[in-house]
Image (cartoon, coloured by chain):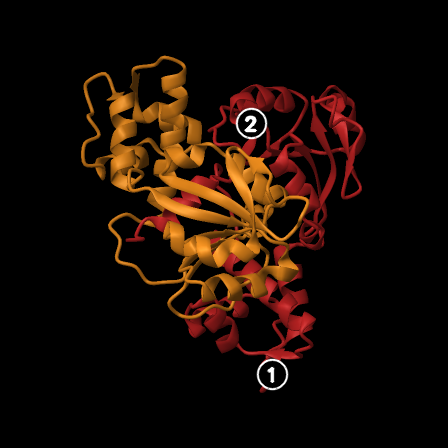
Chain colours: A red, B orange
Amino acid sequence: MYNKTMQKKISDKVINRLTLYHCILQDFINSGSDYISSKQIAALLRIDDSQVRKDLNLLSNSGKTRVGYPVKNLKKSIESTLGFSKTKKAFIIGAGNLGMALAKYDNFSNYGLNIISLFDNDPNKIGKEINNKKIIDIKELPVLVWKHYVDIAILTVPGKYAQQTADYIVNLGIKYIWNFTPVVLDVPDEVQVWNENIMGNFLQFTYNIK
Amino acid sequence: MYNKTMQKKISDKVINRLTLYHCILQDFINSGSDYISSKQIAALLRIDDSQVRKDLNLLSNSGKTRVGYPVKNLKKSIESTLGFSKTKKAFIIGAGNLGMALAKYDNFSNYGLNIISLFDNDPNKIGKEINNKKIIDIKELPVLVWKHYVDIAILTVPGKYAQQTADYIVNLGIKYIWNFTPVVLDVPDEVQVWNENIMGNFLQFTYNIK
């Protein structure tokens, strides 16, 4: 759920689908395929063929040919359209299992997300490294926000510390929070929060099971 | 992204918002508040007041009074509408950081998701417990799927093992896969997959940053 009205050319739903197409293209590249059809993509996602074609038509250069889309070309086209090349730097706040999982997720760098380091207040974690990213004492955050010009925080602290941590990082100049905690944060107007709302996603999935 | 046409009374977007309202109501209960207004909810989520009222009107019994909605009553009403009371059993496949994080997430049980156990093939993990859930050898999955009548799997294995693991669990009778891997799975028609697509969510968030 997005908290601010934005002027955008591509809707959230299309962005979501384009990233799924991007995953499929990576699989095709890994398996040595040169071309892909909109039907193949549609079948994997169980959506309509015409929907896929419509989405791909939004790209600046999908490179469609008689034998289908050239896989590498199409992948690059999605990347440039969605701005993967503009790298965004972020800190992970909270080095628990979820923070660690996100730090390990190598795919992020393919999508232009550069996670600089993790922060925690647990002396047993501070100083350790995960996937070449250091876990740093949260007390050092004020200095490092300025040093690295980071304004995106990925919030993965336990729910009971979510609001106080948000207050702390917003005060330091963080402008964008990707919120993985199950708490709806109360932040100043100029700060944007994206609530990951994992449970909401699950309920959409299971709402009609049995 | 949902892969099957469903007849549903409540749209995905509304379900998503209702779970966010539910989080807010829990916060209000924790802080000892008895009543909440649609304006308070709308302000926290930065959405329109009228949208909140419209959503809450869908509930069977929102209990609206002159001084606002009674918090506990409204929370129960959301729970019964979204079917939190119908408990769903699930296995986590892959006891890495993400699997562990989800196993630790106590909130799931509040939403009717009962995670029975985790499965992995790493001898160093097998036999350990996390949040009272055992990590079991993946080889024992065939027996346990039948023993517990589980047909929901939460897939948190590394991307390179995603498709082969999906083939294996589908073959054992798993009908619903909550897919946290960055791979689009190729599964039989009767199996439903919900792609968590974390990167897609992030890109929706950051698409218009700078």
Q: Is residue B62 visible?
A: yes
Asked which quadrant contains residue B184, the reply is: bottom right
In which quadrant is the N terminus of chain B drawn?
bottom left
Tell me where residue A152 appears, x and y as whole percent: 65, 35
Instruction: Determine the image quadrant of residue A88.
Output: top right
Q: Nearer the viewer, residue A142 or B179?
A: B179
Q: CA distance from mark 1 to mark 2?
A: 50 Å
The residue depicted at 67 percent of the width and 79 percent of the height is A34
From the viewer's perspective, tell me whether residue A122 is left or right of residue B154: right
The amino acid on which the numbered mark 1 sits, given as a three-letter code, is Thr
Q: Nearer the viewer, residue A148 or B32?
A: B32
Direction from residue B70 to residue B197 in the image, left or right: right
B164 lies above or below B132: below
Q: Residue at x 67, y 39 (%)?
A: A100
Looking at the picture, tell me which residue is in the foreground, A129 or B64. Answer: A129
Residue at 68% of width from left, 22% of height from top?
A172
Check residue A158 in the rendering and tell me which mark sits there, or answer none: 2
Give the x, y percent position of residue B173.
Answer: 41, 62
* Mark positioned earlier in the residue sequence (1 or 2): 1
The amino acid pointed to by label 2 is: Pro
Image mark for residue A65 = 1
